[in-house]
Every structure is written in C-alpha cells, then in structure tokens.
Image (cartoon, helix red, strand yellow):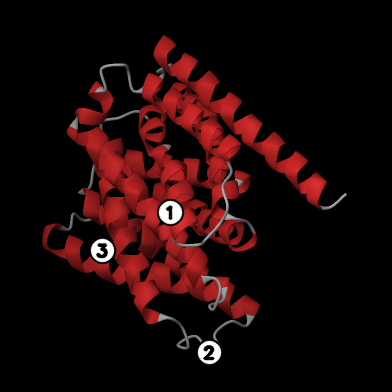
C-alpha cells in the first residue's frame, strides 16, 4: 500500500496537469488506455492469459463502472483543488472501507480501531475547515463521491480476489474502463498535443504500478488494516503542491495532518501488537 500511494501520487499529479487541457472523462480514458499496453505485456510475462475469460463478470463490470465514474469525478475535482485538499477529502475512503468490510467481508474491527479511525477522520474535517466549505464546493463534492466509489471498488475487489487472479482483475479493470470511458469521452474528444506525450507516458507507468500494488495490498491483507496506510499520501501531496505549484498548506491542514498521522501510527502499532499476541 505504501508503494501504491507513491505511484498514485505521481499518477494524480499527471491527471491534474492533463485536466487543465482535456475534459474530465477524457482524462479518465487516457489513464486507462495509456496503461493497457503495459498490463497486456505483464499478463504475457506472467503467463496469465490462460483462463482469462473464466472470471466473475458481474463484479468486474461493477468495478469498471465505478472506476470510470471515480476517475472522471476525481479529475474534475483536482482541476481546481490542490492535491493536499483533494487527498484530505478522499481520506474518507478508508473509513468507508472499514465500515463496508464489517458488513460485506465479515471482518472484525474492534473498538480501538474504530476510535483511531474516527480520530483520523476528525483530522480530515479539520483540514476541510470547521465550516465544511471545502466539502460543499462542486470540486469537493466530486472528490467525495470519488472516495465513495473507491471504497466500494476496494471491497468488491477483495471479494473478487477470492476466486479470480490479481492479473485478471487488473487486466479486465483497465480494458473495461478503457472501452467505457473512451466511448463516453468520444463525442467531446480533444486531440492530444505532442507536448503532453511525456505526461501520458508518466501516467501510464505510474498508473500501471499503482494498480498492481494496490491490488496486491488488498489481496494479501484485510481491507480495514491496509486502508489506513493511505494517509501517507498527504505528505506526498504537500511536497508535490510545493514543488510544482509553490503552494503550502495552511494551519488547518497542518493540524489536521498531525491528527491523521497520529491516528495512522496508532493503527499500525495496534495491529503489530495484536499480531504478536496472536502469534508469539
């Protein structure tokens, strides 16, 4: 998950830059289309083309539809929000994953983990300002809906991993999103400029490795345990915002970040102690 966060930060930076020149749905399509050749090469290297069609189509289609909406909404939101602001709103995702994992995956989440995650969510609210104005903007609401889609996709991916190979999950997600987002973006498609080709290459590589890393993360760990590691994205967002746009977070963001990081560290420590107690 830590590796996935780094690659997703790079990918989101590319999407933010591209969203200044292309419609949100086209950015979603470009994200999937650019990574698809790498995914196909990866499947060939892994010898995973065998039984490629023996999958649970209903869940793959659900994840593709959610993925298209999630990428388009995020691209729309990050066009005006800084990465730090967008990620702060998106941090509601792990909270929703934890809640869904209880009802869908039947995972156990004890009171201490609920408390720590609630404290972390309180930090997110501080980042968004006490008035909540960050959430109520159209861009903020778009990122919020993207976070909801992400949570549903992550939990459905965990269910899908019980029967389907991770390589097949990545392949069908990229292919179906490419077809769906491409078809939706076609009527208003804007010709890609040559100067943006390096951005597309970076988008392809970062998106490919991010998808592999996050798929493996949720395949090998409980969703409610893996998800809190996403809080590290805030540090990357602040650094990228400064390097590319010379913007720094204000005092609300700094205080909220301290609360979020503190709750995340507690969750990591709690899981380590819990695991050691079960397996001395």
Label drawn at residue 181: 3
**For residue 273, what is the image quadrant?**
top right
- Give the mark nearest the N terminus, 1 or 3: 1
Identify the residue at image location x=36%, y=33%. 89
Instruction: Give the residue number, with chain letter if any, for mark 2.
Output: 51
On the image, the x and y values in percent for residue 56 come to: 43, 81
On the image, the x and y values in percent for residue 18 come to: 31, 44
Tell me: 197 left or right of 135: right
Q: Closest to the observer: 63 or 82? A: 63
Identify the residue at image location x=39%, y=52%. 150
Relative to 200, residue 86 above or below: above
Residue 206 can be seen, yes or no: yes
Tell me: 229 left or right of 98: right
Q: Around disc 3, counting alpha carbons within 10 Å, would you say few (fewer than 14), some (14 to 19), or many (20 or more)? A: many
- Give the mark nearest the N terminus, 3 or 2: 2
Q: Nearer the viewer, mark 1 or mark 2?
A: 1
Q: Around disc 1, counting alpha carbons within 10 Å, would you say few (fewer than 14), some (14 to 19), or many (20 or more)? A: many
Q: Considering the numbered disc 3 on the image, is that residue within a helix, a strand or a loop?
A: helix
Label drawn at residue 100: 1
Relative to 150, residue 179 above or below: below
């Amino acid at each position: 998950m830590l590796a996935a966060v780094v690659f997703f930060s790079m990918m989101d930076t590319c999407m933010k830059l591209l969203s200044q020149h292309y419609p949100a749905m086209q950015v979603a399509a470009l994200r999937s289309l650019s990574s698809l050749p790498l995914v196909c090469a990866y499947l060939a290297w892994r010898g995973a083309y065998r039984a490629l069609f023996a999958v649970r189509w209903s869940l793959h289609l659900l994840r593709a539809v959610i993925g298209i909406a999630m990428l388009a909404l995020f691209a729309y939101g990050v066009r005006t929000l800084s990465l730090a602001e967008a990620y702060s709103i998106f941090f509601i995702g792990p909270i929703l994953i934890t809640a869904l994992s209880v009802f869908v995956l039947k995972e156990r989440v004890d009171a201490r983990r609920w408390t720590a995650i609630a404290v972390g969510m309180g930090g997110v609210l501080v980042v968004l300002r006490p008035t909540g104005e960050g959430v109520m903007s159209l861009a903020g609401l778009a990122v919020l809906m993207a976070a909801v889609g992400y949570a549903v996709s992550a939990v459905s991916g965990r269910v899908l991993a019980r029967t389907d190979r991770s390589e097949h999950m990545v392949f069908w997600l990229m292919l179906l999103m490419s077809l769906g987002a491409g078809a939706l973006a076609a009527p208003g498609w804007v010709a890609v400029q040559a100067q943006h080709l390096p951005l597309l290459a970076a988008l392809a590589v970062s998106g490919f490795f991010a998808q592999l890393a996050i798929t493996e993360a949720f395949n090998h760990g409980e969703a409610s345990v893996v998800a809190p590691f996403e809080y590290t994205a805030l540090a990357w967002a602040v650094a990228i915002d400064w390097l590319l746009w010379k913007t720094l977070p204000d005092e609300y963001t700094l205080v909220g970040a301290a609360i979020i990081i503190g709750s995340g560290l507690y969750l990591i420590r709690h899981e380590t102690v819990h695991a050691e107690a079960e397996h001395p």
